[in-house]
Amino acid sequence: GIQVEQSPPDLILQEGANSTLRCNFSDSVNNLQWFHQNPWGQLINLFYIPSGTKQNGRLSATTVATERYSLLYISSSQTTDSGVYFCAGGSQGNLIFGKGTKLSVKP
Amino acid sequence: AAGVIQSPRHLIKEKRETATLKCYPIPRHDTVYWYQQGPGQDPQFLISFYEKMQSDKGSIPDRFSAQQFSDYHSELNMSSLELGDSALYFCASRFQGAVGANVLTFGAGSRLTVL
């Protein structure tokens, strides 16, 4: 099955800093989503991005489908950005999740 | 906008008991997915249904069963509960016929604790 690798596994930032999270896939996927899991456990969909670039406020994402990776950019980080960021993808509808990047933003 | 509704949000059971989780997908969504997320783990796909028929199966234990009803809501039944079943259970839904149909929308999850 498809393997999803995320890096880095842990990230500590000072408020206001920028960061880049990476997601690599072992095989082609036709659906790719980035999620933020908040401290209460809710999975918030950030982007549906099987290819190309999208932006939403301080967040943006880029997927290079031919090279099987995706990047999530967080600019001017805030303490509320803390939590776990998951990328997930698949080719048959259901999503395979990576292990996540645990982000801690310090004030 | 309506979201995926899961109930109950929290559930505490004893070992060997049974539990039932319910999921109400977004209106007009025809496909439902169940995921299990253990403490500190990533969500693992359990099972999915399309138009009330099982469409795919993941790492769902034999003690678990699920179905999708005529109104498209789904239930996950778990029997002979074990301590290791303590987890956050997510339901997700999508409508296969829409543009961007591959977007899965997740519910808030049901947290099961087995004592």
Image (tube, coloured by chain):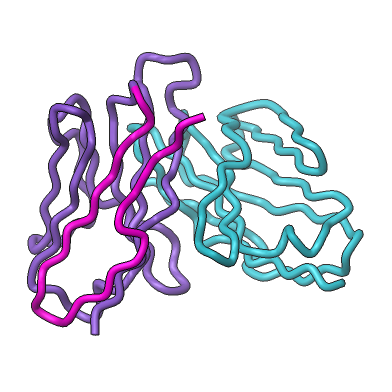
Name the spot of residue B105 as percent of width and height, x first.
45, 37
Quarter of the rendering containing residue B50 = top left
What residue is shown at x 67% (from left), y 70% (from top)? A10
Residue B103 lies left or right of residue B30; in this view the side is: right
Task: Tell me residue A38's x, y (percent).
Answer: 59, 60
Query: Drawn colour of chain B?
Result: purple
**Residue A92, x across and y down, in percent:** 33, 32
Magenta range: B1-27
User: Looking at the colours in the rendered structure, which chain would you say is drawn in cyan?
Assistant: A
In percent of the image, x 35 and y 25: which residue is there?
B27
Residue A37 position, x and y percent, is: 56, 57
The image quadrant of residue B36 is bottom left
Is residue A78 toward the left or the right of residue A41 in the image?
Answer: right
Q: Nearer the viewer, residue B63 or B79?
A: B79
Give yes or no for residue B26 being in the magenta stretch. Answer: yes
Q: Residue at x 8, y 73 (%)?
A: B80
A64 vs B21, nearest the viewer: B21
